[in-house]
Amino acid sequence: MIGGTFAATYPDRIGHAVLMNCTASAAGMRQKIEYGFLTHFGKLLGAVRPPLTRSVLKAFLGPTTFSTRPEVVSFVRDTVQAVDVDSSFWAVKSIVPMRPDQRQLLSRVTTPVLVVAGAEDATFPVKETTTMANAIPGAGMTVLEGVAHLAGLENPPLVSTLIEEFVFRG
């Protein structure tokens, strides 16, 4: 989301932009309630513990990763459980309830943009990511099968190839 804002605000500093697993829309009520509950419950517990960990994993990872990439699931689980709850509270607060609708701003982007969505992304579903891509003049859109919200972690070779082809194509 920062990348899109930067591309719209400072087009002379961007050669190409890849906007991955993100949105330009304000958060909906469901997301505000869900993430508000998770962050406040985490603050009450003083840490991210099960069942909060399971909720976070389901928000970030999809069925393919759960069934075929146990090392990614373990890494994300360990990372989530080690997070500083106060820091995560402020990060989530800025990304969810305080997130502005940036679609009008993104209509000013002039650099080549590739928007990437994970087909299994529960946090920013394909429809929402497509809405963002449609707000950016000339943006390309790719939906990656078998990945969710953490595409670069879930399938690094696929994401690396995609970015390389986009940035270095004729």
Image (tube, helix red, strand yellow):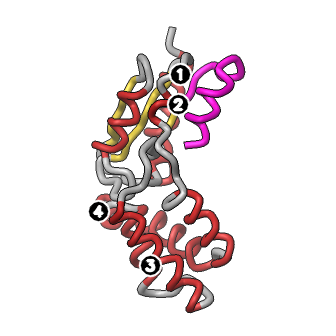
Q: Residues within 10 Å of mark 4 (few under 14, many from 20)?
A: some
Instruction: Tell me whether the residue at label 2 lies in contact with that at label 1, contact meaning CB atoms closer than 8 angstroms.
Output: yes
**Residue annotated with mark 3:** 37
Residue 130 placement: quadrant: top left
- C-alpha distance separating marks 3 and 2: 30 Å
SS type, badge 3: helix
**Main SS class of the magenta portion in the image:** helix
Question: What percent of the width, then of the height, locates residue 61?
Answer: 39, 62
* Residue 2 belongs to magenta span: yes
User: Label 2 sits on what residue type?
Assistant: Leu
Q: Which residue is mark 1?
A: 108
Percent across and percent down for residue 4 are 55, 34
Please state which of residues 154 and 18 is positioned toward the viewer in this rendering.
Answer: 18
**Foreground: 52 or 94?**
94
| Mark 3 or mark 1, earlier in chain | 3
Residue 32 in view (yes/no): yes
Residue 106 placement (x, y as % from top left): 50, 29
Q: Secondary structure at mark 4?
A: helix
- Which label lies toward us, 4 or 1? 1
Residue at image point 63% right, 19% down? 15
Q: In which quarter of the view is residue 81 placed?
A: bottom right
SS at mark 2 in the image: helix
Decide: is 138 above or below 101. Answer: above
- Name the mark on residue 105: 2
Tell me which amino acid carries mark 3. Phe
Q: Depth check: give the residue in front, 16 or 1.
A: 1
**Any magenta on residue 55?**
no
What is the spatial separation of the Cα atoms under label 2 and label 1, in whole angstroms? 6 Å
Residue 101: image x %, image y %? 46, 43
**Residue underneath mark 4:** 63
